Image (cartoon, rainbow, N blue to C red):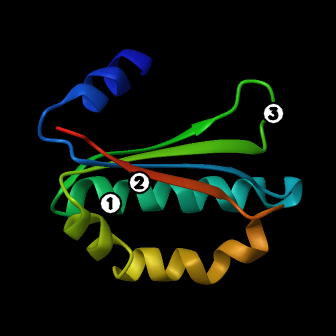
Amino acid sequence: MADELYHLLCARSSKLYVTAKFTVKPEKLDESLTLMKNLTEATSSKEEGCVAYYYLQSATNMYEFSSVEIWQDEVAEAKHWQTAHVQNALSVLPALLAVEPEIIKWRELN
């Protein structure tokens, strides 16, 4: 997995990277895992401009996750936030999270 992510991060067609770190409530772990799986499947297979979309679970705390999104450009990433599956996720997310997520976006400088 690490090798695959490294190669995706280095891909020339990738322009915008989005990462997030978040913690889910222990009693909401199963529901959170289902949501992440559904988001990954919907985004990776259906959204134009999505290069990669992953959720990674911490090896030291089963309730901590990181997400990695790689988009061809800012337009594709902006469209992502308007999709039905993301809007649905945003409506249930506050009940799942223990704290506000930390989200970082950066662009390829080339």
Q: Quadrant of the N terminus?
A: top left
In this rendering, the answer to whether 3 lies above or below 108 is above
Identify the residue at horizontal 36%, vertical 55% (top origin).
41
**Disc 1 to disc 3: CB gap under 8 Å:** no
Q: Position of residue 21 (x, y in %)?
A: 64, 47
Q: Give the amino acid at mark 1.
A: Thr
User: Mark 1: which secondary structure?
Assistant: helix
According to the image, label 1 marks what residue?
43
Q: Position of residue 36 (x, y in %)?
A: 54, 56
Q: CA distance from mark 1 to mark 3?
A: 26 Å
Q: Position of residue 38 (x, y in %)?
A: 46, 61
* Residue 64 in the figure: left or right of residue 66: right
In this rendering, the answer to whether 11 lies above or below 97 is above
- Disc number at residue 14? none
Disc 2 crowd, CA 10 A, few/some/many (<14, 14-19, 20+)? some
- Disc number at residue 61? 3
According to the image, label 2 marks what residue?
40
Mark found first going from the N terminus, 3 or 2 = 2
Q: Give the amino acid at mark 3.
A: Asn
